[in-house]
Image (tube, coloured by chain):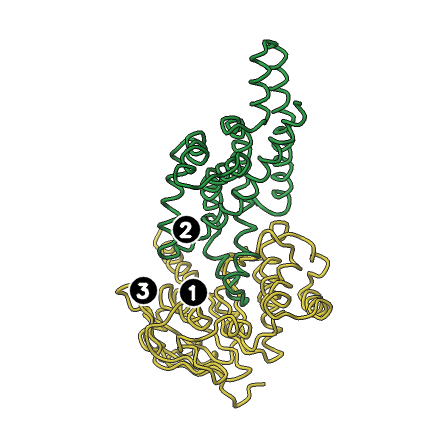
Amino acid sequence: MITGKDVLKITDLKKNFDQTAVLKGLTLTVRQGEVLVIIGPSGCGKSTLLRCLNGLESVNGGQIVFGGQYLTDPQTNWSRVRQRIGMVFQNYELFPHLTALENILLGPLRVQGRKRPEALATAERWLTRVGLWDRRDSFPRQLSGGQKQRVAIVRALAMDPEIMLFDEVTASLDPEMVREVLDVILNLAREGLTMLIVTHEMAFARAVADRLIFMDEGRIVEDARPEVFFQNPATERARRFLNIFHFDEIHKRQGEERDAGD
Amino acid sequence: MFLAAAKLTVILGCWGVLLSIVVGLFCAVVRFYRVPLVRWLVGAYIELARNTPLMVQLFFLYFGLPRLGLVLEGETCAIVGLTFLGGAYLAEAFRGGLLAVGRDQIEAGLSIGLNRLQLLRYVIVPQALAVSLPAISATVIFLLKETSVFSIVALPDLMYVAKDLLKEGNSAETNLLLVISYLAVILPVSLFFGWLERRLRFAGFGS
């Protein structure tokens, strides 16, 4: 499903918060239909990268080109651009005063000026797919975390975006709800939607990614196919990072040794 | 006579409150977005309006301005005065609500492409109103009670008529009637706000 066309071209992107450099010259190209998973320790700049792409953060240097348009141009009409870039947040951020359906329709009706029947049909199709059409009139507080996040994904999809950004979308969820959200994303990946996914779910990263980016201290340290990265990371830094997720095993072995010593 | 007086109190109070809401919302948004220059004017206005009594403000409008060549009718003075005072109080009530809307909510609104005005209208203001409703209702009731000062600009409102009757000497009944009249006007407003608060809570807040 990955076509040769580049949808997103990032060149030497720099971002500072006050005196601290968060992105230190980042270069990355994303092709249409590609599922790019970004992992790395907290503070490595992966969320900041996503936020720069839809203008939630201003950039301090470098270029972002999206569908032929320079997003680093200060004249950028962000309202236009954001209609083509869907974003899903860690804490859902559904609008609490609107029902699930109203949350989803707000963008298509008010921003894109679509006709209600058409927008409603799109909303129904997506909500049905994520299994929540019968909860359309519920307010966010009446939904579980997993349901809220699925509605938030549909809210972004209802705008027909060309690319989707997922910023640690399962990090606030109870473990049993993580799966239902990840399954939705897996399905989107199968259909060839271009996605940039920041996550700490390693098994999911491995399953969903066409390509995996490992970031540390504002730089891309590794850029590889997921199976290569997980089995044989090229750098010592990535190896140490992956070891964090093997904590249980190490701990058990130490425990066994101690038991043997007793 | 009391009925006509009550009607005048209600009409002046309604106008004052409605215009106060408009002024208050405008001022709160200016302060919220830190609009350069205008925010200083708004800040100065709020301090002036909140730190002087309504009676003094009315005196200035009714007796002071004519000396400067601007003559306002009693009713205009009353409405302008109440709006001057109420706009400042409501601005602060609204601002409290605006500040309670999280940065993340604003980003969620931006990320679906809402522009500044749409963001205010569909995301920020509805949530801010729900949060500041208790403060708004307290202010509105306070403003309605403040209308009792209007008699000083020679308007035949409830207080004015009662004062006239009191001069004629039937004090106990008049006092009671006055209390009942104000209660009849303001209690429904108070109950309405209570109902509105419960309704908004049901609509998905305070989760």
Q: Decide if residue A225 is on the left or right side of residue A11.
A: right
Tell me if residue A35 comes above or below residue A176 in the rendering.
below
The CA span between labels 3 and 1 is: 29 Å
| Amino acid type of the residue that numbered disc 2 sits on in the rendered structure | Arg
Kind of residue indicated by mark 3: Phe
Q: Do the residues labelled 3 and 2 touch (CB within 8 Å)?
A: no
Q: Which residue is drawn at 45% across and 56% down?
A: B103
Q: Callout 3: 10 Å neighbours few (<14), some, many (20+)?
A: few
Q: Which of B101 and A233 is in front in this view?
A: B101
Q: Residues within 10 Å of mark 2 (few under 14, many from 20)?
A: many
Question: Which residue is disc 1 drawn over?
Answer: A245
User: Mark 1 — on which chain does it sit?
Assistant: A
Q: Name the residue under label 3.
A: A17
> Which residue in the protein does label 2 denote?
B31
Q: Nearer the viewer, residue B44 or A108?
A: B44
Query: Mark 3 to mark 2: distance in Å?
Result: 25 Å
